[in-house]
Image: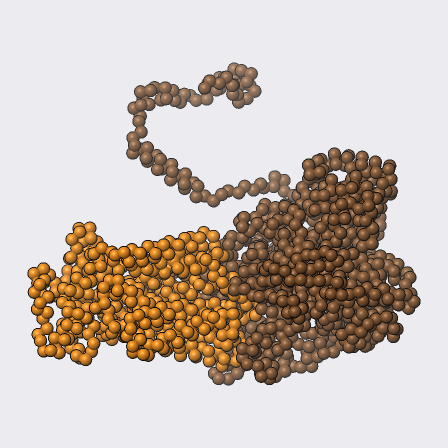
């Protein structure tokens, strides 16, 4: 076809310059004779290709094309054109920052690689701790499904400028009309933000700030205010405590943010004394599981027990009632009195009056454990204000709502009132990091960055001023809430500058901003607050009367709502790591359920049968509270108080979540008035079978006590651990030449030579391990452990390299006991296998034991798993053919097989199946393909990096410099990793400790993971 | 050629057979057309095989996750089937090699098919170690071949590697032994074949057997040498398979009794499978006169002996589990724990099928009954499958740490692959029955005069042992061959 387009190569040519013409003419000295060939028809016809030739060409081209197609797909990466100074490819950068998402607050260190945050660790200098949720928060950053990406108005995208303009106009209108606008936020615990809010309110006097915590501790804050004149939570220094009495306060869980570190610091058997901890509770909580003594008592009786304790300690006689546990209460009163100021009483009842009684007891004890000066700011929510706001909104008294990172549509018990009210508003703006039902119902949705992309400051307690700094460029078109509020107040300052000047002016006291930012925190001095408004003796009877009148109304079942270690208040419900994280107590993942006592389950006909595929099923119960019903599966919980049931909040979120994550039942509708105890609950069995996904089915140790050794403090102090009869850390004995000899005196194999270099050991102190599971998630993040989903976890295919086994005690603990009871063999096994109604609980972290004589190593036909020179049992994924013999021969069953491809597989649509989620992968650790075995590597990538760093710096590796992900995530110091060839390393002395033992030492696998016998303070106070 | 045999011994070949009759009988299934029953059996087997292959492709294409395994139970039906098939493969070599050395003439009627069964069973067995791998395409890494992966070598400590050697040696020796025996019979078919293509094929298969005296001499020598070579293999293969378990540290697997116990169990199951197959074959291919009650009885005697050994081994295992006093031995596959646990049904199935059922064979009537033997043999096959399932699944379901106790439930793929191997086995066996001489006719002919019913009767009656009538009838046609 003819074309009159003109093609040109340069401007000169276009302008018809003669030079170009001449040059172009001379480009080919001889013209290529295409015309000669193509134009001459005859030649063309003569040059016919024979059939043979044609087939040859076709054959060749096909072969060439298919060969070329054999090449793997090329993934292009773009190198830095100008390399940022502080980014060295392959070297991690650590930033100190803070997490504050409204429920979880922590001073943390963030590991970034090539500009991507990939892991969160506690900032130990700032006394920071991380829970499983804090560890997992890094994945929520990359949640491309749920995060808001652009500002929208009524669902349509809008620019920031337009949004500001429209909202600004509307805000002005409302201001002029003096209509109420509510700023609804969660607890931010940020002094600069508080100031910005103040300024915003100053600029817009019609704005009211309401703080709403989905899971409320309003009662404690109100009580504290009534007593000490300041709305905050008291701090507890449990490390100094001699006696701890807790009435349902899950202080190793989410009570006041958790106190596991100070609790465990007070429980070091080698110091000779441990705190004596008694837990009165209805649900089996993590705290109760760790208590020296756990007294099962239903919530209404907890109230009376608390009052009885008050009476016993103060000698007064406020109105109360006798409870089944009065004997224990009396005993504890004596203990507390004996401990005096070293005793403390806590209660988890979210009730101002109950909290007041506890405060009064502590006051009466003159307790030093409770700290009323360096208070906590992490739960500022005010139930009364929230309730008022919702009813005002429903009544149409409110014209505008600016919400920030809250989801009342999901988490309010009267969510429908809120939704109705929302529709009446003239202006509704949701500032949020993630999409949720409230954002969806609001008119404007303005994305805010994740805390890992944000500037900010924090003030969790009075002493520690924390700073938050971005660790990555914002992934989406987001703007911080502070910038937004500044803008709407008419302040043109950037929040970063504002923060810097705020900190310099108010906090830093002349010291360097850069240093504070580098450290992530700054320690302030607290001025003692001596305000004391509450007169214990006068009003306590009044308080007690109110308290017992509410408890007296108790009828039917009593529901104790709680938060799970994994999901908390449900903010991170779309986080696959947390969904797959097994609950420390029930070891169920991907679910919440109604926990019920064995006695009640028997009466009502509930059961948890184990199916043939190893998984557990459950029946459904219809739970009705105050006319609101939900249908939940029932999990029978040993240690649950009869007449009480438990249900976890934070589940059942559906809006915007991936289908796989829409698990569990939303318990918030039952959470009336933010009260974690609900009376008058009816339970009805309904049809249907629920499929649970538990990672552990057998609940007891089945008489195998050399796996898990427990001693009492008294035994620890007085009995020789190796004593043949009564020893609490007896070595294993085996028969050799018909003599009983210590197992470690005979050996089939030669010792590995460990004279040269490092030899790594990991010590796990069962006394210090609370079972919190931060290590499980840390391991997940560090080692790119895949998430497999509920269906696969159910059939026993979770991929966790590190798991925490939980064992309940049984009524009959040993074979000897069973024999004394005259049980037949079958009955003996049954007795050993069945958990007690109120069992003692022990946690045992379990990962590859890195046996020096590893059973897995001898059986691999291709030598894919072999022993490293530094003590590790190493796994060469490339070499593995996947016979699974190693897993079968591993007595600890810690090897995990890739049953499927877990990355880039739509069947497993979790973080390894999308481009954002993959950004969290640790580039130092390979993503395993299907068909290969994997397991704990003792974080060899971390130890090697440490060695290389020392080498580069021309020095020996420092004492205690080696770390693994689990050991650095461990809040309580239960896990200690190090080099036993360096005798100064802490672990070197730990492996020699009299508490040290190897699991299954009768097998003589000689593990490099050493456990320390659990010591409980059971027989003395 | 024939040896002396006491007249009170029962004949091994029934009927008025001449040498030529034997030839005719054996060649008939090959030369004739297949009947409806054969086709029906073949298509059912083929369908099962294709279904199994489909399941295998699905497994290889998707991942081992399509099976019912879990983090705590890494093997179940795969290795159960593997050991089961290897065990079945045991009888062939025992019959052909050990019985040859012991000059048991009754083996001649059954050794061909028993060996065929061995080889086909080993094929099935060999499938499982390959497909049970997570990455079967790298399966050749278990072979100690020079490679370019650096200096990577196999791990000679691993029992799985010993398996590779044991099974491949067993397969190759069995195959050679089988084929050697087949040479004169293939030659016979070749000589009778009328279609040129068929003739060519059988000429190739018979390796140019000419029937000269030298051929026969070498044949005898090679048979003896191979029998000597194969005899230790009877013991070694299952010894090594048992070491997959015995050298591990799982309570219930870690047991020094395993090698002899597994060998006995393998012979037990192998003979049971021979009973099953021959029970069908003697009917289908009209070999009733060659595979007699006496053969069945002899095999039953072996079954009851090996079954007895197995029963004693079970009792020992049960006793030791109790006697150790170790809580780790509470739940081995033969223990009170297993008898009261979730796998009690498998435990009692094992006892019923493997210990109780064979006891019926103490009764001569049952021992000599075709139908009873057939039923009992099937029961034993099932029982021996349960034995391996129990050993693997029950032991793995109750590991050292109670937190890892789990259960196994097969998926349709597990079942499909097992059924597929049964189909594959029968496809091979049915094809074999139509193309191979199913009885070692050359060998049977050597005992015709000493153990044939016809000749025995004649001898008793003092009549010269020449089958006058029948030979006269067909004399002209194949006189030469029948005279050896």
Q: Residue at x 32, y 61 (%)?
A: B120
Residue A24 locus on image (x, y percent): 48, 20
Q: Is B62 in front, or is B298? A: B298
| Location of the C terminus of chain A (image quadrant) | bottom right
Q: How many marks?
A: 0
Q: Is A694 in front, or is A78? A: A694
What colour do you see for chain A? Answer: brown
Give the side of residue A1004 with respect to residue A290, left or right. left
| Location of the N terminus of chain A (image quadrant) | top left
Residue A448 locus on image (x, y percent): 72, 44
Give the side of residue B234 with respect to residue A918, left or right. left
Give the side of residue A245 with respect to residue B85, left or right. right
Q: Name above or below for residue A823 compared with residue B196.
A: below
Scheme of colours in the image: by chain
Q: Residue at x 13, y 73 (%)?
A: B455
Give the side of residue B49 with respect to residue B212, left or right. right
Q: Name above or below for residue B376 compared with residue A659.
A: below
Q: Residue at x 29, y 55 (%)?
A: B39
Residue A930 locus on image (x, y percent): 50, 54
Residue B174 locus on image (x, y percent): 29, 65
Q: Residue at x 58, y 41 (%)?
A: A78
Q: Chain drawn orange, letter?
A: B
């Amino acid at each position: 076809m003819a074309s009159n387009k003109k093609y040109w190569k340069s401007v000169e040519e276009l302008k018809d310059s003669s030079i170009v013409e001449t040059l172009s003419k001379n480009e080919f000295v001889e013209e290529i004779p295409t015309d000669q060939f193509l134009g001459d028809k005859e030649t063309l016809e003569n040059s016919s290709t024979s059939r043979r030739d044609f087939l040859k060409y076709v054959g060749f081209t096909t072969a060439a094309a298919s060969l070329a197609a054999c090449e793997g797909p090329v993934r292009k990466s773009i190198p830095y054109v100008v390399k940022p100074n502080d980014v060295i490819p392959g070297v991690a950068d650590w930033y100190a920052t803070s997490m504050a998402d409204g429920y979880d607050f922590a001073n943390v260190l963030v590991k970034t690689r090539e500009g991507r945050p990939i892991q969160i660790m506690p900032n130990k200098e700032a006394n920071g701790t991380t829970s499983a949720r804090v560890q997992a928060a890094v994945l929520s950053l990359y949640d491309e499904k749920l995060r808001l990406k652009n500002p929208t108005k009524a669902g349509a995208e809008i620019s920031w400028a337009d949004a500001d303009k429209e909202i600004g106009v509307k805000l002005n209108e409302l201001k002029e009309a003096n209509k109420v606008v509510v700023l609804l936020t969660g607890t931010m615990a940020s002094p600069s933000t508080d100031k910005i809010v103040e300024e915003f309110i100053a600029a817009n006097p019609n704005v009211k700030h309401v703080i709403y915590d989905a899971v409320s501790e309003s009662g404690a804050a109100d009580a504290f205010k009534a007593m000490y004149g300041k709305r905050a939570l008291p701090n507890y220094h449990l490390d100094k405590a001699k006696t701890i009495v807790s009435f349902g306060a899950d202080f190793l869980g989410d009570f006041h943010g958790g106190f596991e570190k100070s609790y465990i610091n007070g429980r070091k058997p080698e110091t000779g004394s441990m705190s004596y901890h008694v837990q009165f509770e209805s649900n089996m909580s993590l705290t109760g599981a760790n208590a020296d003594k756990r007294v099962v008592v239903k919530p209404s009786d907890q109230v009376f027990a608390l009052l009885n304790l008050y009476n016993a300690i103060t000698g007064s006689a406020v109105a109360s009632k006798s409870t089944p546990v009065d004997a224990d209460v009396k005993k504890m009163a004596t203990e507390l009195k004996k401990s005096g100021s070293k005793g403390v009483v806590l209660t988890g009842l979210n009730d101002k009056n109950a909290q007041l009684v506890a405060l009064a007891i502590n006051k009466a004890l003159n307790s030093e454990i409770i700290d009323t000066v360096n208070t906590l700011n992490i739960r500022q929510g005010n139930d009364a204000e929230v309730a008022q706001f919702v009813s005002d909104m429903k009544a149409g008294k409110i014209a505008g709502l600016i919400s920030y990172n809250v989801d009342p549509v999901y988490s309010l018990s009267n969510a429908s009132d809120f939704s109705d009210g929302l529709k009446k508003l003239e202006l509704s703006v949701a500032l949020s990091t993630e999409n949720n039902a409230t954002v969806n119902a609001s008119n404007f949705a303005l994305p805010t960055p994740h805390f890992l992309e944000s500037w900010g400051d924090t003030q969790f307690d009075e002493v520690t001023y924390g700073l938050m700094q971005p660790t990555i460029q914002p992934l989406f078109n987001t703007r911080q809430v502070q910038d937004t509020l500044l803008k709407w107040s008419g302040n043109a300052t950037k929040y970063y500058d504002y923060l810097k000047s705020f900190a310099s002016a108010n906090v830093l006291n002349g010291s360097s901003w850069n240093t504070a930012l580098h450290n992530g925190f700054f320690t302030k001095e607290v001025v003692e607050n001596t305000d004391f408004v509450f007169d214990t003796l006068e009003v306590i009877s009044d308080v007690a009367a109110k308290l017992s009148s509410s408890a007296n109304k108790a009828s039917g079942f009593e529901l104790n709502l709680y938060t799970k270690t994994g999901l908390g208040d449900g903010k991170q419900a779309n986080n696959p790591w947390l969904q797959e994280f097994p609950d420390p107590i029930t070891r169920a993942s991907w679910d919440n359920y109604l926990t019920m006592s064995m006695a009640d389950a028997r009466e009502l006909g509930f059961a948890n049968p184990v199916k043939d595929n190893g998984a557990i099923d459950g029946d459904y119960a219809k739970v009705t509270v105050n006319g609101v019903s939900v249908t939940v599966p029932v999990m029978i919980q040993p240690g649950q108080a009869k007449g009480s049931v438990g249900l976890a909040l934070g589940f059942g979120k559906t809006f915007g979540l991936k289908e796989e994550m829409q698990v569990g039942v939303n318990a918030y509708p039952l959470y009336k008035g933010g009260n974690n105890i609900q009376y008058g609950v009816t339970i009805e069995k309904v049809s249907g079978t629920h499929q649970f996904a538990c990672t552990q089915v057998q609940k007891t140790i089945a008489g195998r006590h050399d796996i898990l050794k427990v001693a009492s403090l008294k035994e620890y102090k007085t009995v020789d651990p190796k004593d043949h009869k009564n020893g609490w850390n007896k070595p294993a004995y085996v028969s050799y030449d018909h003599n009983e000899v210590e197992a470690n005196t005979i050996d089939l194999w030669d010792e590995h030579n460990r004279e040269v270099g490092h030899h790594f050991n990991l010590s796990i102190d069962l006394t210090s391990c609370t079972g919190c599971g931060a290590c499980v998630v840390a391991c997940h993040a560090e080692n790119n452990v895949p998430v497999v989903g509920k269906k696969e976890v159910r059939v026993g295919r979770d991929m966790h390299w590190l798991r925490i086994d939980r064992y309940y005690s049984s009524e009959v603990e040993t074979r000897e006991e069973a024999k004394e009871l005259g049980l037949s063999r079958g009955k003996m096994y049954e007795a050993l296998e069945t958990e007690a109604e109120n069992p003692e609980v022990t946690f045992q972290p379990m990962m590859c034991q890195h046996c020096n004589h590893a059973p897995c190593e001898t059986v691999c036909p291709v030598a894919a798993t072999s022993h490293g020179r530094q003590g590790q049992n190493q796994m060469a994924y490339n070499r593995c053919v996947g016979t699974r013999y190693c897993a079968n021969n591993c007595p600890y069953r810690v090897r995990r097989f890739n049953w499927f491809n877990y990355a880039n597989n739509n069947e497993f649509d979790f973080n390894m199946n999308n481009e954002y989620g993959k950004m969290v992968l640790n580039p130092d650790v390979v993503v395993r393909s299907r068909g290969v075995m994997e397991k704990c590597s003792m974080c060899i990538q971390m130890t090697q990096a440490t060695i290389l760093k020392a080498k580069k710096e021309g020095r020996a590796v420092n004492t205690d410099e080696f770390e693994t992900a689990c050991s650095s995530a461990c809040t309580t110091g239960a896990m200690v990793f190090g080099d036993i060839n360096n005798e100064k390393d802490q672990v070197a002395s730990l492996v020699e400790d009299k508490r040290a033992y190897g699991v299954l030492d009768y097998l003589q696998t000689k593990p490099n993971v050493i456990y320390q016998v659990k010591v409980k303070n059971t027989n003395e106070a | 050629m024939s040896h002396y045999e006491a007249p009170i011994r029962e004949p091994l070949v029934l009927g008025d057979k001449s040498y030529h009759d034997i030839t005719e009988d054996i060649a008939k299934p090959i030369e004739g057309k297949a009947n409806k029953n054969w086709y029906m059996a073949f298509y059912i087997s083929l369908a099962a095989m294709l279904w199994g292959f489909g399941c295998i492709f699905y497994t290889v294409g998707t991942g081992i996750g399509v099976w019912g395994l879990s983090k705590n139970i890494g093997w179940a039906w795969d290795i159960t089937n593997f050991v089961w098939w290897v065990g079945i493969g045991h009888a062939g070599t025992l019959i052909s090699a050990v019985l040859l050395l012991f000059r048991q003439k009754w083996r001649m009627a059954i050794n061909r098919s028993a060996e065929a069964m061995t080889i086909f069973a080993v094929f099935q067995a060999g499938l499982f170690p390959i497909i049970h791998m997570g990455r079967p395409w790298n399966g050749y890494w278990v072979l100690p071949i020079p490679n370019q992966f650096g200096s990577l070598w196999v791990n000679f400590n691993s029992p799985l590697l010993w398996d590779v050697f044991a099974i491949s040696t067993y397969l190759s020796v069995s195959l050679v032994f089988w084929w050697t025996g087949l040479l004169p019979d293939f030659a016979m078919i070749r000589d009778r074949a009328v279609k040129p293509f068929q003739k060519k094929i059988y000429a190739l298969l018979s390796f140019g057997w000419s029937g000269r005296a030298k051929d026969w001499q070498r044949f005898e020598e090679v048979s003896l040498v191979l029998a000597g070579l194969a005899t230790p293999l009877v013991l070694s293969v299952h010894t090594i398979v048992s070491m997959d378990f015995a050298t591990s540290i799982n309570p219930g697997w870690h047991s020094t009794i395993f090698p002899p116990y597994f060998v006995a169990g393998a012979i037990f199951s192998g003979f049971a499978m021979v009973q099953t197959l021959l029970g069908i074959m003697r009917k289908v291919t009209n070999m009733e006169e060659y595979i007699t009650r006496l053969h069945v009885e002899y095999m039953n005697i072996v079954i009851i002996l090996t079954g007895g050994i197995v029963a004693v081994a079970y009792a020992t295992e049960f006793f030791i589990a109790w006697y150790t006093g170790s809580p780790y031995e509470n739940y081995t596959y033969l223990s009170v724990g297993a008898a009261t646990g979730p796998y009690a049904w498998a435990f009692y199935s094992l006892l019923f099928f493997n210990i109780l059922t064979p006891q019926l064979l103490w009764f001569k009537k049952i021992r000599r009954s075709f139908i009873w033997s057939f039923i009992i043999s099937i029961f034993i096959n099932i029982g021996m499958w349960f034995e391996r399932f129990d050993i693997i699944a029950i032991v793995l379901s109750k590991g050292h740490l109670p937190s890892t106790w789990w259960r196994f439930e097969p998926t349709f793929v597990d079942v499909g692959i097992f059924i597929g191997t049964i189909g594959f086995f029968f496809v091979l066996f049915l094809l074999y029955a139509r193309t191979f001489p199913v009885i070692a006719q050359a060998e049977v002919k050597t005992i015709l005069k000493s153990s044939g019913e016809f000749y025995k009767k004649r001898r008793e009656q003092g009549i010269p042992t020449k089958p006058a009538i029948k030979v006269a009838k067909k004399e002209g046609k194949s006189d030469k061959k029948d005279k050896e």
